[in-house]
Image (tube, grey):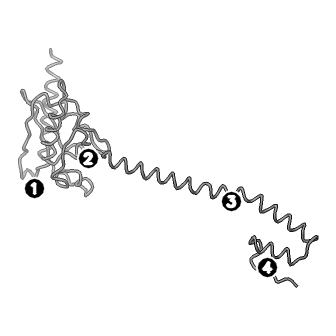
């Protein structure tokens, strides 16, 4: 009994300190790359079951259970002036808490698909998408769209073409290697033949097979 009360007081104290910290701090200053994944960079982004999501910056949001509701506090709307704008929390149903908690624990460089977020007991994708959309519109969630089948299909086609090019290049190199023994044999035969046939005939044969770049004229 005493331990349970102590744990509840500790949780309450941690939540109060977390809310105070979020109210005191300045809003996150996103890089251009980070901004491109938020609602500022893509305000009309579609939230689908395959959409990859994560908290846009670690430590900018906290979920707190207050009564029968799950309350999200964040610093995304804070003013650069100290306490210039009060916190504006979002209220969710209590069964949305596992989804939000998992989402807030997913930070760079990790991503998670909307459909993989927990939402017991029903695991309704529509509820998950509504939660992500609400947080995305607050500017604290980063999203990226899952690569479509068409793009993967194009990539596979490019890989097939590359493999085909390699196959076309392969026989040329192989044929050259196979022809080397024949060239050596021809040179050997011509070397021996120099003692048996007139020199001008040997020169004509060498010129025909490009074995001499500029053979001299026969005497």
Residue at horizontal 11 percent and vertical 30 percent from the top: 65
Looking at the picture, how far across and down is residue 195, in whole percent? 94, 71
Return the disc, 3 or 1, that comes first in the chain's sequence: 1
> Quick one: label 3, few (<14), some, or many (20+) residues within 10 Å?
few
Q: Which mark is residue 176?
A: 3
Picture quadrant where residue 136 is located: top left
Return the disc, 3 or 2, that comes first in the chain's sequence: 2
Indicate the secondary structure of the residue bearing disc 1: loop
**Residue at which label 4 appears:** 215
> Quick one: label 2, few (<14), some, or many (20+) residues within 10 Å?
some
Left or right position of 111 against 158:
left
Say which of marks 4 and 2 sits in front: 4
Say which of marks 3 and 1 sits in front: 3
Q: CA distance from mark 4 to mark 2?
A: 68 Å
**Residue at which label 2 appears:** 145
> Quick one: label 1, few (<14), some, or many (20+) residues within 10 Å?
few
User: Marks 2 and 4: in contact by CB < 8 Å?
Assistant: no
* Closer to the camera in the image, 92 or 205: 205
Left or right position of 211 against 146:
right
Residue at horizontal 46 percent and vertical 50 percent from the top: 160
* Closer to the camera in the image, 95 or 80: 95
């Amino acid at each position: 009994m005493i331990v349970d009360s102590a744990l509840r007081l500790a949780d309450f104290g941690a939540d109060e300190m977390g809310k105070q910290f979020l109210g005191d701090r300045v809003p996150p200053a996103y890089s251009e790359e980070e901004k491109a994944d938020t609602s500022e960079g893509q305000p009309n982004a579609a939230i689908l079951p395959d959409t990859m999501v994560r908290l846009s910056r670690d430590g900018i949001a906290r979920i707190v259970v207050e009564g029968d509701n799950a309350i999200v506090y964040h610093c995304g709307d804070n003013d650069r002036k100290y306490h210039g704008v009060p916190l504006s929390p979002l209220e969710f149903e209590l069964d949305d808490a596992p989804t939000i908690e998992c989402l807030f624990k997913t930070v760079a460089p990790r991503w998670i698909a909307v459909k993989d977020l927990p939402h017991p007991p029903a695991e309704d994708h529509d509820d998950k998408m509504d939660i992500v959309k609400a947080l995305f519109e607050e500017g604290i969630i980063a999203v990226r769209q899952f690569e479509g089948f068409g793009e993967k299909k194009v990539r596979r086609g490019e890989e097939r073409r590359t493999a085909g090019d390699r196959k076309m290049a392969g026989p040329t190199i192989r044929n050259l290697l196979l022809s080397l023994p024949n060239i050596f044999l021809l040179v050997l035969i011509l070397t021996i033949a120099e003692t048996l046939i007139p020199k001008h005939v040997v020169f004509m044969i060498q010129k025909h097979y490009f074995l001499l770049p500029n053979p001299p004229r026969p005497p």
